[in-house]
Amino acid sequence: MSFEINWENVGKDAGINFSIKSFINSHLESIELPSYVRSLQVTKFDFGSTPPNVILKEISDPLEDFYQAVAEDQDGEIPMPPLLDPSLENCETGGDKESDVQFLVEFDYKGNMVIEVCAELVLNYPSPSFMTLPVKLSISDIGIHSLCLIAYLAKQVFVSFLCDVSDPILDSKDSLMDASSANFLGKRSLERISLIRSIKISSEVGEHNNGEGSVLRSVGKLEQFLLEVVKNMLRNEAAWPSWINLDFNDEHDDDNDNDNDNEDARDEKPT
Amino acid sequence: MSFRFDRGTFEDNSFNEQIREKLTAALNSSSSQSESAPSQGAKTAAKNMEEVESETKSSKKLDILKSGITVRRVNFPSIPQLEILDLDVSAQSKSLLKGICKVSCKNAMLEINTEIEANLLLLYTDNSPAFTTPRLISNDSFTVPITMTFDRIELEAITNIFVKNNSVGISFNDVNLDFKFDCSIKLLQSSIEKRLKGSMESVFRDVLPSVIFSMSQRWFTHGEGGTGAGDDRSVFPAEDHKRVPKTILDESDLENLSASNMLRLSSLVASRQSLSLSSTALKTLSTIPGCLERQNLHRFNSRIPALSTFYPDYEEEEKLMTRSASNNVVVQTACKEHANTLPQRVLDEHTYDLKTIASVQSRIYERSGGDTSNIRRRKIKIKRKDVKTTHSLQEEQIPQSQSGDTKLHLAQRPIASDTIFHSPQPLSAIQSPSVLCGEGGEQESLSGSPLSDIPQLQLPATVCKNFKNTTQKLSLLEEAQQLNHKREFQKLRSSLYSPMRNSKFCVSHELESPLLDNKGLTFVGLAQKWKWGTEDLPPPYAG
């Protein structure tokens, strides 16, 4: 069973692209950057015209690992007053498991999404921001074909990318890339998932100003390096056995206001 | 221009002032400590190459200078340019970043003022012994103020920059330096100018690179505090000297070491020293832990946790069956395994098992050196109240798109501005599912432990068959979990086997007393009087 995505509406609507861009930017602003990086922002965001192919493979009970994690999490938070909140206890004892659910989704994207990111590298010597080096990265041709687990339990959503799925198009790209690197020699052990199977990062270093000087374009090694960094980060953060946990539980210091119009429509209302 | 300089600092003259102050400080410190002077001087104006002049000044270590040096004026009427011509980033440890830059600086000006000794007959009697010193009627000094102006300094250079782990190396390849020199004492002008220009080459070849290198090392090691760096340097070496190497070769120390660990280590060391692999084994190569015969490689590979082991791609499997001795096939399969993918066909036919995939992935993670306690499981708290507000905001902005709304929301959730990012929380140590089936002995020892709750990995029948024969040999590859803290062994192990095997030691019968006696193993652990026969089980040192 696959989702039908009305991608036309998303891809062509400049408003959505713009709002997502501004959203990411506002988030980036809130991050505290190291002193040598300044004004990191997304300058262009385009969904592209090719929709992702999302196929729901399986609906089942969540894996044990999720329950373990939840249980341990609850144990770890002893200082918090759990007794005051009977609803939480309900969740952890598993008395309310009917609403727990886990989707196994095959996610296949080989689209033409384009993201452009700008940043400035700063030298703070001898005076603050004395010298800056603008760097522009344009990311496109993202290719993903993976199995993704989405589990919902105890008012928490777990998202984890389980494994890659073989794909003739992406695999051929992959092998081309690896042939040049040292991976071929078996120097590196098997990576469990690469998640982003293909990506194109084109870089632009320096500033073109008044027709003077030159801009350095397409620094291959830099692009390769960034690709590795991004891959590793995603692998560490979102690939099984790691996951991203979105907690919809109320904050403890909140006065426990119950919003029943939860987006998931599976809200476990405290009784 | 590739690099952008802050115009403000140049326009409001603050840059000139800063350079002037730092140059003055550096040049004056040079008279007291001539050794560190060049580095101090260059540090102040590393990027602007103005220290070139200061270098040559401070290299005159004589007492001919009668007063401090004051830098009267520094002027950069135009902003210097730094342009990147090439960039090379490599993730390897050798060199992180290489770049070729073009530095150019135009029309800069520098004016230095000091006093020099003009009495050529002056005798410096301070350090000479009294009995050699003649009685002088007049030995007065005669100081003359001198002002030197470097005008219209034009610098253009191509530099190679290497940024390594904690240092910056620079080499100047193509230097074009030109300046107009003007001295208040006209007599000396030509001589000084000649000397300055003659020493320029060594400045760019030796002095500047070494100065920038040492400066960058101080930056990286002590943060960017450039001024306090001198003090730091004097403190740290003193601490280093206090450290006394500690020996642990007392009798009592050895008692705490695990006997089996020592045996394993010593046999490994012995085999490495002698290059004789058979010394560590009884009969065949394959009994050596970590040593593998070529013809057994495919068995070993088939035991490596990978999706392709459990869900072999059908075509690939055929290749493996008909494999010849040629290396091509092996390489191909290795490549295949490198991309750890689930075949699309398996997915389509629903012949996969979710738990199997999950445990395989977990094990690959463990094998790749990931500590199970370091699993990143980021928790993003989402206060429902705030999510709702942003959500509705979104609706107001784009009311016309219907389906986009829900998708937008999906994309939004992780990046909502009001989320709280928790630092990575090690929530649970994932317990590895016990190893492959077909090893009955090990499974039994596991029963009763919490590990036994983990679902077993099921091998496809074809793969299982492969294992049956090799079980005996491969069990020698076992490693004990207690070795976890041994760093080197961990590396060896992680490159070979899954770390999460058995909680108990599994020392097999590869250790025999003749082996130990004959080979004259030098490792200290063997001094103890342990005698293990072929049949004896080793004591459970695991505790």
Image (spheres, coloured by chain):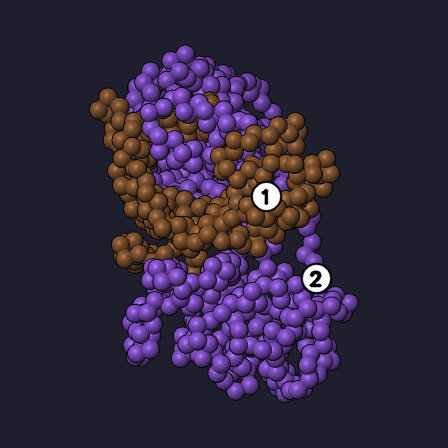
The number of numbered badges drawn on the structure is 2
* Marks 1/2 same chain: no
Residue located 42% across and 25% down the image: B394
Question: Going by the picture, which residue comes out furthest to the top?
Answer: B12
Left or right placement of residue B344 versus residue B262 in this view: left
Residue located 61% across and 33% down the image: A250
Q: Which chain is purple?
A: B
> Can you tell which mark lies on residue A154?
1
SS for callout 2: loop
Badge 1 density bin: few <14, some 14–19, many ≥20, Cα 10 Å: many
Residue B195 rendering spot, x and y as whole percentages: 35, 30
SS for callout 1: loop
Badge 2 density bin: few <14, some 14–19, many ≥20, Cα 10 Å: few
Residue located 26% across and 38% down the image: A49
Residue B200 rendering spot, x and y as whole percentages: 35, 33
Instruction: Identify the image quadrant of residue B204.
Output: top left
> Can you tell which mark lies on residue B247?
2
Decide: is B139 above or below A180: above
Residue located 33% across and 15% down the image: B77
Q: Nearer the viewer, residue B133 or B490?
A: B490
The answer, for residue B55, to whether it is visible in the render is no
Q: Which chain is brown?
A: A
The answer, for residue B253, to whether it is visible in the render is yes
Instruction: Identify the image quadrant of residue B137.
Output: top right
Q: Amino acid at mark 1?
A: Ala
